[in-house]
Image: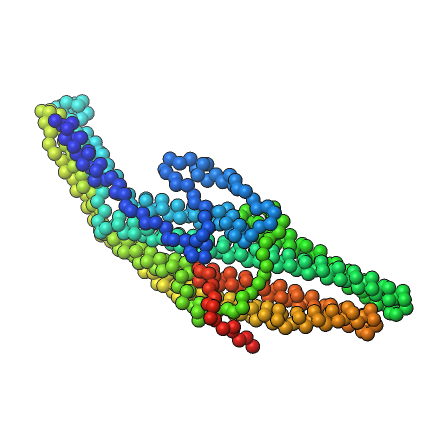
Amino acid sequence: MHIKIVVIVFVLFILSGCHEQLADPLAPEPPALSSDFTVFTPPAVTENTDPSIATADPNEFTNLKGVITLQQALALALMQNPGLKSYSWQVRSAQADKLQASLKPNPEFSVYIEDFGGSGDLRGFEGYESSYLFSQLIEVGGKRKKRYAVASLEKKIAEWDYRAKRLEVFTDVISAFNDVLSAQQRLELDIELLRLSEDIVRTVAERVRAGKDPPLDEKKARIVLAEISILYRQAKNNLDFARTRLASLWSSVPMFTKASGNLTVPKRIVSLNDLLPFLSSNPQLSASAAEIERAQADLQLEKARSKQDVTIGGGIKRIGQNDTAAFVLSLTVPIGITDRNQGNRRRAVCQLARARQQQRQLNDRLRTELADQYNQMANAYSAAIEYDESIIPAARAVFEASKKSYPAGSIDYLDMLNSQKILFMSLSGLVKSQSDYNKSKAQIERIIARPIEIPDDAEKPSHK
């Protein structure tokens, strides 16, 4: 009979302390800017997972070779970028914290043996009494739910941070890819410039030998050729570095030979006012809002922690002399002479105020960053249009005329050299403007977390 009672009480206490599985909401949808790509997902782990297996990174993937596209680079980086992987593991860690916060305290089992080893009737174990109790800590004030709410919001913050990192990697790949395209075009220009300079040296040397030009012109031409050779080698080094930087985003070395694509600008761009409404889509702002919610939940939790928990217990007591038994109940209530949680409540209030101010600061910073990137994009767009439609056609016409006039003696060497310099400076300026436009556009898309869509009926902006 005694054993049956003990078992029944034990089962009741075990059930009272069992973990109640609470629903874990899904992670937010991926940002529209990168929703078409698969990303690394860390494997699910349990308390028995071998850490060496969970943290192993065999880095088995097919590196990009030959000619690559932007889509291929984005797909590989979003799957292999180590920084993005670390953020995904942080989400897993937050999930574990959320699980931990949902657990109830376990019951305790206690055994008390009294009145033994004494004198007289209490010699040995003749008159001993034994008690078998199960006790359970009861959290009052809804501590468990409030603790779970804090952990849920911390997981939500980790998810928004992950989305922000995903956009950052996406933008970094676009910028690095544009740098490769820009370096490729600059190298092509320098190769063409080197070829033309070699032709000019030969032409000048022929005219010097014919007595049409002074020997000093040939020396000048060879100095210019040497300088252009230096620019050519620098352009090759710049391309190598751009390729290395791009490949580093998927934690590798460059195996590809060329980036496919051209640097271009559209016929029109959207206005800044069209972009401002999308600023609310920025995942950093969403994370900031979740920070405020978490700070509010933490304040409620600290208020609940100021309330004293109680411990209840129950069991049986066996009296050895007459072999009888009786129920035993216990109640433990802490004596709250002083509030032991004052500092934590004050800290929670301060953290809430801090989170609100940080949200305002972030909002102001993102608006300023958006305006700055738009200004850079608009300036680069204006310059690219001007180079393409006006400056380069005029510079090319002047250079072609100079190439024909110099052998005929209509102009001197310095005039032809100047026309060549103007043309290639203009071509380089176009490449830089196109690259700057695309990099600023990528930064804007990161800030608003969506692609920039140019309406068909938009008018070309006027830039003074």
Where does the image place residue 423, in percent across and percent down from the top left?
70, 68
Residue at image x 62%, y 66%?
A: 430
Q: Is residue 64 left or right of residue 153?
A: right
| Quarter residue 405 falls in | bottom right
- Position of residue 86 relative to residue 226, above or below, is above
The quadrant of the rendering that contains the C terminus is bottom right
- Locate residue 56, reporting x and y percent: 48, 38
Q: Is residue 359 above or below residue 145?
A: below
Left-right relation of 133 to 410:
left
Q: Quadrant of the N terminus?
A: top left
Q: In the rendered image, is residue 228 in sight?
A: no
Give how far across and how far down residue 218 sits, in percent. 84, 65
Residue at 14%, 38% in the rendered image: 329
User: From what the image shows, is residue 435 above or below residue 315?
Assistant: below
Q: Quadrant of residue 105?
A: top left
Q: Nearer the viewer, residue 215 or 7?
A: 215
The residue depicted at 30 percent of the width and 56 percent of the height is 297
- Closer-to-camera residue (312/442): 442
Q: Residue at x 58, y 56 (%)?
A: 261
In the displayed structure, does residue 174 sit left or right of residue 294?
A: right
